[in-house]
Image: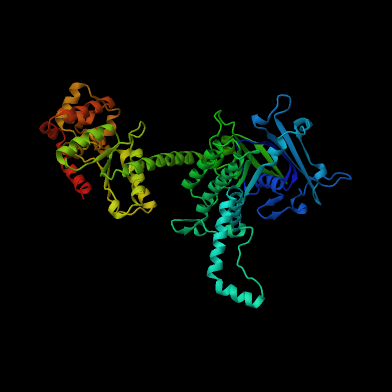
Amino acid sequence: MISEISIKNFRSISSASIKGGRITTFVGSNDAGKSNVLRALNLFFNGTTGHDELFDFAKDYNLYAKKRAKKAGEIEIKLTFTLPRSYRRDDLPAQVEWKKVWREEGEVDRLSSFSYVGGVEIPPRSKVPALIERVVYTYIPAIKDQGFFADLQGKLYDVLSDVAAEPLKNSASDFESQLQIQLGELLRSLETIFKGRALMKLPENLREIFENLEISSGDIPLSRRGDGIKIRNIPMILRFISEKQDQILNRGGVRYTHIWGFEEPENNVEMSAAFAMAQDMYDTIAGRENLQLFMTTHSPIFYKMRSPEDNGSAGISTNFVERVDNDTLIANRSADEVDVTMGLMPLLAPYLEEAKGRYDELQSQLKAAHELAAQKVPTVFVEGPTDVQVFKKAWTLFGDADLKLHVNDGGNVGYGSANALASRSLGWLLEMRHRAKADIVPAVSIFDADEAGKTAKRELNDNIGALGIKNNLSFMSLAYPQIQPIRALVARGFLLHADLESSYSDEVWLLAEKQGWLEDCDNLGSRIKPEVLQSVLNDGADNPFDQLTGAERLRVRRRFSDAGKLKAAKHIVKLGDPDASAALRGLKEWIEKTRGHLAA
């Protein structure tokens, strides 16, 4: 792994020393010179400064480099590699240095050097030179055109020709045989004209053919996909290439080390895909000791990626790049410091962090929805475990006891919220949208009618519209109904929302008070309309709280505690059907409406 990069007089960099981690990011404005580090690595390993861009000393030499008396201008790049433990010796350093120098005539071999740090020579029979020579550097430019993707597919052929040479050769021979058969008449005519045997053969090197093959998904060629989709596939292709080259290692020999120089991976990639791409990069680097990533980026999605090391951020090196006068300066900084330096990033970073959390939650819900949908059973999504217990009881009373039903609250700690319910609902819809009409399973989501529930329900509907999800997926989102006692209190000026517990009968509320299942509401002022409160304070109107009696007083001034919710739900579930029907009578019409949808 590269642990340090030293660059002198390359393009806008007059002198820079950069620490390398498993993942090393370069963040800065567009003209700061971030890409010059990645281009310097490409020059070092591949002899070119960009994708199909030849080295040109006049263009690549720093224009503002200090003149040296009687000495030619030089570009110098020195890399320090930290050796794997299996390549170290107790009597020698753990790092080696490799230096290359370029002048106007090109690379100057006599000025190059390769040794342990401090100038200690490499022993003659050491395997270290072979290890370093097997470093493969792949440069991914900011503009990823068709030529780049063709070359990437060519690299696929290069590695496959090493790993599976015989099968590819046999397939080519079979294809050539078919050509001879299908073109027999033409070839015989050519033999007459040229007085010799005529054959139609594939070229010895199939790379050019491989470059022009189409990778398709869902009958749509990758070449016709949007830039974001194509870019999203780059890490997967690079990983495949590295894994195939590692198969060669299994046959013996020195292993390969793969280093990727990725410019601005966020270009043309929408946010959720960028999160997935960053996660793929992290997982790939974290899982393989012989992979290393250098990248330029403007996005916190990439430069705030978590470390592939277990010990904090040791595996990630974040650098801020800026242009001062005519020089590119590179300073190692924390991701939070980069946020501040980038100006707008402190404003955007919290939103991106929140978006990342929502993305992770949705990914989890998509997986759960896929497993749940496989059961092909009508499904009801609710916020928490008490909703599950009571809905099932109400369904046996007022719904259809013969209709198999799945009631889902997420099943995990932390999923009992309106936002999590919305995520589960969206995950379900994204699963259903790809199904044939005959395989679509009806579902209902049930929200509390408090502010959190209303907001989550509204955002769910907004997301359904934004994602273009059609309304033919047999899905309905509902809120708990306001039963008659709640409607009467609202008409008198009280502010009460509908939820599971509000739908319980007065008898259940009175029992709950007796059993100690209730607690005081925090702010009674929030339970009454402002205009009613003003009339009491300013006009001397009667205090509406003083007029409350019995269960209505409890509904306004008290609420179920968390423990009380569980105890009340267990109590209702244990009741016989007549008593349970009385306790839940406020849900009867609402359950019947739900049954009409789920049984359709």
Residue at the farthest bottom position: 193
Seen in the image, is 412 located left or right of residue 174? Answer: left
Q: In front here: 561 or 256?
A: 256
Query: Measured from the top left, where is residue 142 in percent x and y?
Result: 60, 51
Vertical position of residue 62 compared to residue 551: above or below: below
Residue at the farthest left position: 578
Task: Name the colour scheme.
Answer: rainbow
The structure residue drawn at horizontal position 34% and vertical position 41%, both measured from the top left corner, is 371
Vertical position of residue 562 compared to residue 274: above or below: above
Instruction: Name the image quarter holding the N terminus.
Output: top right
Q: Can residue 168 be seen from the camera position used here?
A: yes
Query: Measured from the top left, where is residue 403 in percent x and y?
Result: 19, 43
Query: Measured from the top left, where is residue 233 in percent x and y?
Result: 52, 50
Vertical position of residue 217 compared to residue 41: above or below: below
Q: Can residue 547 be seen from the camera position used here?
A: no
Seen in the image, is 205 located left or right of residue 356? Answer: right
Seen in the image, is 532 located left or right of residue 13? Answer: left
The structure residue drawn at horizontal position 31% and vertical position 39%, both measured from the top left corner, is 453
Quarter holding residue 114 = top right
Q: In front here: 515 or 44?
A: 44
Query: Measured from the top left, where is residue 500 in percent x and y?
Result: 23, 35
Q: In front here: 581 or 41?
A: 41
Vertical position of residue 275 compared to residue 548: above or below: below
